[in-house]
């Protein structure tokens, strides 16, 4: 077992004692000293432990808010104490860790291992599902640092995994003056991204995408053409490993107010943007490429 994995285990033990007993943050140093003395004799990573625990405690409100939005069906106070603090520590490392020393994918994998070691039967899957969804929303930063050659998880044959079809769209509108605007959604990490969701059994990809956009931001869209698609292996909290196949479309709608659905995990705002505003937005790389293609096509349609 690596020293850093042991250090994270001591972090979880410290956070558990603090959280379970309702101690104040001022008592953290005493709890940490006790945990290290009793369970971490000879540990040479005390600074990492201290900084990680202090960081989680200091940013608990933000971390809990993101976890809540990523798993809206699980109120933070209803999540088990071990699960809750594994999520907090894993999310803290994803968002605020030194990515040169701890690539986000490593932080995610470590959190899953901690969950398996210290939680219940389904804790690993639950943590995997929540943090995996957040990691995906972040654009999977650093995934190539783990494997530059393999797109899929090397431990399984992707062709044997169940497939979850998803659909999303770059939605634009044209008003009576010819002004083009694009509908975007804002996630809890501060990025503007695209509305998307799962395709139900019996739906075509186009039908499912139209329904998802309506449910998520309240727009009735007309699909213009397909922009592209991608596929990746992800972890479902109940099904385990699955393949997610995402289809992206260019779509048009009327220029009407956007209404973000209540309980939309990981999203906190929906807004229209004019062309001149798009370059100023903070977006993920894959979204930026889709938007660039969509702008070109939408502009061509508007001038045809």
Image: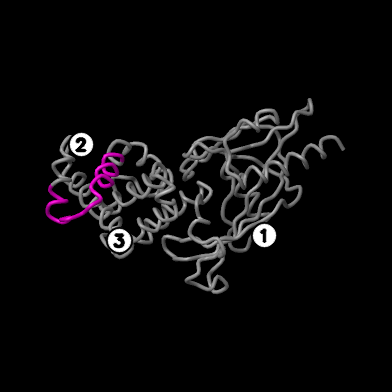
Q: Which image quadrant for residue 221? A: top right
Picture quadrant where residue 24 is located: top left
Residue at (72, 43) in percent of width and height:
294
Above or below, 300 against 243 in this view is: above
Image point (41%, 52%), residue name: 130
Q: Which of 211 and 109 is in front in this view?
A: 109
Mark 3 lies on residue: 2
Where does the image place residue 88, in percent across and percent down from the top left? Answer: 33, 46
Magenta residues?
A: 34-55
Q: Where is residue 204 in the image (x, y as percent from the top left)?
A: 67, 60
Left or right side of 232 for 207: right
Q: Quadrant of the C terminus?
A: top right
Residue 241's spot in the image, x, y percent?
A: 47, 66
The quadrant in which residue 207 appears is: bottom right
| Image height of 162 relative to 97, above or below | below
Q: Is residue 3 magenta?
A: no
* Disc 1 target residue: 204
């Amino acid at each position: 077992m690596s020293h850093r994995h042991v250090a994270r285990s001591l972090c979880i033990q410290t956070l558990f004692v603090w959280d379970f007993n309702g101690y104040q943050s001022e008592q953290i140093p005493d709890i940490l000293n006790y945990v290290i003395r009793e369970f971490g004799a000879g540990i040479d990573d005390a600074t990492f432990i201290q900084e990680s625990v202090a960081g989680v405690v200091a940013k608990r409100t933000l971390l809990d808010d993101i976890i809540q939005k990523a798993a809206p069906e699980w109120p933070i106070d209803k999540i088990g104490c071990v699960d809750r603090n594994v999520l907090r520590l894993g999310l803290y490392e994803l968002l605020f860790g030194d990515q040169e020393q701890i690539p986000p994918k490593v932080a995610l994998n470590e959190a899953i291992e901690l969950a398996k070691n210290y939680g219940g039967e389904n804790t690993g899957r639950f943590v995997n599902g929540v943090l995996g969804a957040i990691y995906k929303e972040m654009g999977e930063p650093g995934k190539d640092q783990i494997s530059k050659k393999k797109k899929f998880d090397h431990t399984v044959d992707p062709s044997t995994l169940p497939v979850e079809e998803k659909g999303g769209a770059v939605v634009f509108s044209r008003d009576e003056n010819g002004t083009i605007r694009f509908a975007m959604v804002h996630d809890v990490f501060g990025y503007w991204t695209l509305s998307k969701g799962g395709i139900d059994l019996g739906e075509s990809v186009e039908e499912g995408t139209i329904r998802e956009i309506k449910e998520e931001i309240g727009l009735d869209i007309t699909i213009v053409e397909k922009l592209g698609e991608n596929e990746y292996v992800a972890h479902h909290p109940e099904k385990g490993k699955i393949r997610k196949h995402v289809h992206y479309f260019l779509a048009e709608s009327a220029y009407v107010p956007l209404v973000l659905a209540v309980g939309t995990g990981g999203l906190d705002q929906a807004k229209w943007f004019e062309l001149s505003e798009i370059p100023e937005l903070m977006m993920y790389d894959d979204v930026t490429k889709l938007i660039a293609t969509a702008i070109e096509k939408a502009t061509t349609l508007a001038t045809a």
